[in-house]
Amino acid sequence: MEKEAMGGVLRNLDCVLDNPAQLRTPERLLIYTLVTAFKPRVALEIGSAEGGSALLTCAAMDDNGFGRMVCVDPEFRFSDAVWERVKHRVTRVQGFSPEALGEAARVVHPERFDFAFIDGDHTFEGVQRDIRGVLPLLADRALLLFHDSHHPPVRAGIDDIIEGGSGDLIDLGEMSVEQTMLTAQDGTEIWGGLRAARFVRGRTIAAGAATNEVCDENSRAAMNTLIRRGSEKIAELQKANESLWRDLQSMREGFDERGQRIAELESRFAESWAEWQAARKNYEAEIARLLAGFEERGARVRELEAHGAKLWDEMTQLSREFDLRGAHVRQLEEHALKIWDELKQLGREFDLRGERVKELDAELARVTAELNGGRKR
Ligand SMILES: C[S@@+](CC[C@H](N)C(=O)[O-])C[C@H]1O[C@@H](n2cnc3c(N)ncnc32)[C@H](O)[C@@H]1O
């Protein structure tokens, strides 16, 4: 839908999705369109947390072109981005309601709050304290909106005040039916829900009559248009929501597996870490022990070094003697070689003479034989 075609309203509808509110989408849409339609001048919020609901109210006030807001919370957690988007309309009063409400009233004095969103202390007593604290600060016909009105203690707290009260507060009932189921220590808890009430000072009147007085025909038509557009947007958002839910489910399957794997790795890491710690302790003890022995060994090493130097001197001396003896050995070797050469020469001469002796032997035998033969004849 073109923003221009909306006639200037719902310009900031984007803030319904781009928002850190702890609210369901129809609840966000309802607050945004309600502020756009009801056009409060001075709004009070009890319980702002990350500033999501304050952002919805401010965005609608921006559409309206006017409006101021006071937020009360003991612990604001607005991001810089959210604060940048609301700071031109919002004053933050840090503290617990109802004690901090006096300060909130001073901020807007002499005006009174014509819209109050209560989402702070969700106990029976807490809600009652907030309502009783807020009533004196309200302008006549102010609109009150409670979040988590399905949460049993909150519902009972509101019921109790409306039923037992003076009639200043007219119950407009539950504006949303969706519940948020949260797992708590002792079972499942029901949360969520927006419930509205009208403050009409000092009069006991029916809700319808009060509504007729503030809504003339034009604003009723405008509101109907807003509601129709809001419903269309809700249907659109619902579809987007369903598709997101499906995506989320499929992502979740992988995510669970990975979560298990991470848990496994974490436990393995813890084991390795313990092993590493133990090893490190041993290692440190070992180093300490070695360091202690190091000095002792250092003295022994120095002793051995001195002994080594002495041995080295002795060895050098022996080596010198060895060299001298080596020269003598080489002289003897040369002499021996000479003798060997002479010996070989004598051997050769001996061999030649041996041959001659054999020849003479043979000659002698032949002459002897001849001599003996001549005698016999
Ligand atoms: C559920 S969160 C509000 C969520 C917010 N309205 C949103 O939709 O974005 C409730 C907040 O109420 C505040 N709180 C609790 N007790 C409070 C008290 N007595 N007065 C004011 N704020 C209170 C908490 O600090 C917390 O930030």
Image: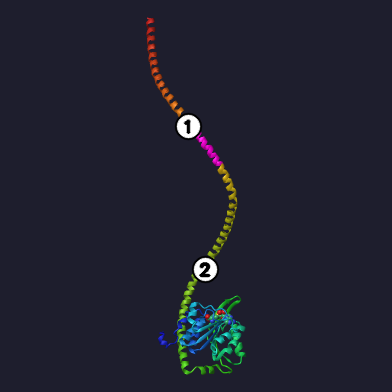
Query: Magenta segment: does it hold 360?
Result: no
Magenta range is 307-324
Closest to the observer: 357 or 55?
55
Q: Residue at point 51% right, 93% down?
A: 214
Q: Quadrant of the N terminus?
A: bottom left
Q: Quadrant of the C terminus?
A: top left
Q: Residue at point 48% right, 74% down?
A: 248
Residue 142 location, quadrant: bottom right
Q: In what quadrant does ligand 1 lie?
A: bottom right
Helix, strand or loop for the magenta stretch, by majority: helix
Question: Which color scheme did the rendering employ for the protein?
Answer: rainbow
Q: Residue at point 45% right, 28% down?
A: 331
Disc 2 within 8 angstroms of ligand 1 (CB): no
- Which structural element holds mark 1? helix
Closest to the observer: 264 or 323?
323
Query: Magenta segment: does it hold 316?
Result: yes
- Which structural element holds mark 2? helix
Disc 1 within 8 angstroms of ligand 1 (CB): no
Residue 367 percent across, percent down from the top left: 37, 10
Residue highlighted by disc 2: 259
Image position of 278 with respect to 159: above or below: above
Q: Mark 2 is on which residue type?
A: Gly
Residue 191 percent across, percent down from the top left: 56, 81
Dot label at residue 131: none
Residue 151 percent across, percent down from the top left: 58, 82
Residue highlighted by disc 1: 326
Q: CA distance from mark 1 to mark 2?
A: 85 Å
